[in-house]
Structures are given as C-alpha cells and as structure tokens.
Amino acid sequence: MRSAPVLSRKRLRQAGFYYAEALVSTVIVGVCLAPAVSALHSALDAPAVEVGIVNGRQHLQSKLEQILAQPIGNLDTAATAAGSPSTPTSYSDPAGTPDRILVYLSRYDGDNADGDNNPFTGTDPSLLWVRAQTAGGTQSLTALATP
C-alpha cells in the first residue's frame, strides 16, 4: 500500500498563498461589482425617462398647433386679457389636468420700433408671441403668429 505524498513546507506555503490571492480577488470583485450594478440600473431606467420626455414634447407640439390654428383676432383678445407675457391665458389647460400645459400670449415688437430692445413693449400690428409650457416648466415651445 502506498502512502500519501508528503508535502514540503515550501509547497504548503505556496498553496496558502494561492488561497489568499483568490480570497483577495473575490473581495475586490465584490467591492467593484456594486457600483457597476448601480450604473447598469441607471442605464436601464434611461429609456423610460426618454419616453416621458418625448411624449411631453409631442403633447406640447399638439397644443401649440391647436393655438396657432385659432383666428388671430381670438388670440389677440386673449393676449390683451392676460395683460402680460408672464400671465397664462384662457387657452391654458384647466388646473388639475394631468400634464397641464400653460399658454402665454402677448403682442410682439419684432422690429424694435420703440428702440428699447424689449420685444413686449412696442407692438407690431398682427404679430403675436405664443408660448406653450408644461406646468412644471421643464419644457416649452415658442412661436410667432401672424394672420
């Protein structure tokens, strides 16, 4: 019957060294894996955020097109009633509406005829500034309307 081979002390130390290397590398991988998983999680959430932004932009575009389809006289009346380019007009969605859009209208001084460099003080005939903005203020679209 053969006896088991006897390992020298040198070989025993080398075997222990390999075990320590494996243990340290496992700990390093474990520590580095947590941020990597977190980054992947953020990357997986990005498409959902992108869809929300695109849908909001399309909703704004639709609202702006509805406003620009109105007769210029109606828009001018709403702009006069608002009294200021920072006051939402009656074309805004009612309060409590999901994804509410605020609409701002104002007469516009495109040629700066009064020389004060403020486009909202002097007015050009039949030129209106139109802005549609999400209620949270994260997205907006602006246009000029003429008859």
Image (spheres, grey):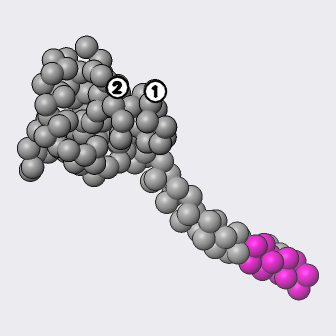
Name the one closer to the observer, 12 or 22: 22
Residue 13 is one of the magenta-drawn residues: yes
On the picture, is 94 further left or further right than 62? Answer: left
Identified at 64% across, 73% down, the residue is 27
Snapshot quadrant of residue 106: top left
Residue that carries the numbered disc 2 in the rendered image: 124
Query: Which element is circle 1 on?
Result: loop
Task: Tell me, yes or no, if residue 1 can be seen here.
Answer: no
Measured as percent of width and height from the top left, residue 100 is found at 17, 44
Dot 2 alpha-carbon crowd within 10 angstroms: few under 14, some 14 to 19, many 20 or more: some
Q: Is residue 3 above or below residue 132?
A: below
3D distance between C-alphas at marks 2 and 1: 7 Å
Measured as percent of width and height from the top left, residue 115 is found at 49, 37
Q: Is residue 40 above or below residue 140?
A: below
Give the residues drawn in magenta, as a range. Answer: 8-21
Residue 67 is one of the magenta-drawn residues: no
What's the residue type where badge 1 is placed? Asp
Measured as percent of width and height from the top left, residue 17 is found at 81, 78
* Extreme residue toward the top, this view: 147
Reading the chain from its start, which is encountered first: label 2 or label 1?
1
Name the one closer to the observer, 38 or 94: 94
Identified at 35% across, 48% down, the residue is 138
Count how many numbered circles sit on residues in the image. 2
Asked whether the residues under the numbered discs 2 and 1 touch, taking CB atoms below 8 Å apart as contact, a structural biologist would say: yes
Q: Is residue 70 above or below residue 42?
A: above
Residue that carries the numbered disc 1 in the rendered image: 111
What's the residue type where badge 2 is placed? Asp
Instruction: Indicate which disc residue 146 carries.
Output: none
